[in-house]
Amino acid sequence: MAGHRSARPHDHARALAQQVRALREARGWSRERLAKEACISTRMLARLEGEGAIQPGFFTVGAVAEALEVSLDDLFRETHVAPGLWSAGYEGRDIDSFVASLLDSRIDVVADVRLTPISRKKGFSKTRLGEMLGEAGIDYTRLRGLGNPKENRAPFWDGRLDVGHARFHGILRSEEAQAAQSACKGGMLTK
């Protein structure tokens, strides 16, 4: 996704989510490991890292900061919001809340990178998703070449990030992925 306009409160949640994720990954920790170290549920950490509409409270963020051995001041001071491409998932959301979160984040364009743009979840198949986004003033485009194939998802789920990243970098060298990346760089994803 691209098309960030200006900083809003949700932007700070996004920046915090990115900071927590970056600090966790820098330690080589899985989401499960950080959740265990912070004595919180994996689901709660997923919410914090997922930039969702429902953000964890102060004490949860404090427990995460302590587990990462950074102060809250440092954790928040280090966050910054940068325009560009953002990732968003729809697990645990309905189509209305998903679109609302995109609007709240001032997203202009959604690039659907799913290899097969169908979903059992109402509203998230290609046609209906495109219609709902269009009604909200958000452009929709398909960039299948940038999707992560099914056979490369397990390494990300079980914490073998180096394996998943290596495979995905190979995928990004394909012709289809190169064309999609060129479209991104060429401004196709910005209004």
Image: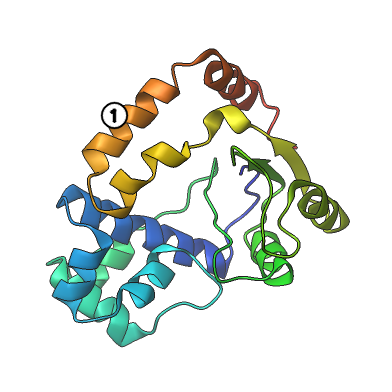
From the top left corner, tell me how far across and down residue 62 is, in percent. Answer: 25, 79
Position of 60 with respect to 33 (left or right) is right
**Quick one: 79 or 59, which is closer to the camera?**
59
Instruction: Tell me what residue is drawn at x 67 percent, y 60 percent.
Output: 120
User: Residue 145 falls in which quadrant of the image?
Assistant: top right
**Quick one: 136 or 130, which is closer to the camera?**
130
From the top left corner, tell me how far across and down residue 104 is, in percent. Answer: 66, 65
Tell me the kind of residue under disc 1: Ala
Q: How many labels were placed on the picture?
A: 1
Q: Secondary structure at mark 1?
A: helix
Name the quarter where the N terminus is drawn. top right
Query: Can you say whether 105 is above or below 154 in the image?
Result: below
From the top left corner, tell me how far across and down residue 176 is, in percent. Answer: 58, 18
Task: Decide: few, some or many residues near mark 1? Use Cα within 10 Å; few <14, some 14-19, many ≥20.
Answer: few
Instruction: Tell me what residue is drawn at x 22 percent, y 45 percent.
Output: 160
**Is residue 135 something that shows in the picture?**
yes
Position of 171 with respect to 21 (left or right) is right
From the top left corner, tell me how far across and down residue 183 is, in percent. Answer: 64, 22
Residue wearing tag 1: 166
**Is residue 78 something that shows in the picture?**
no
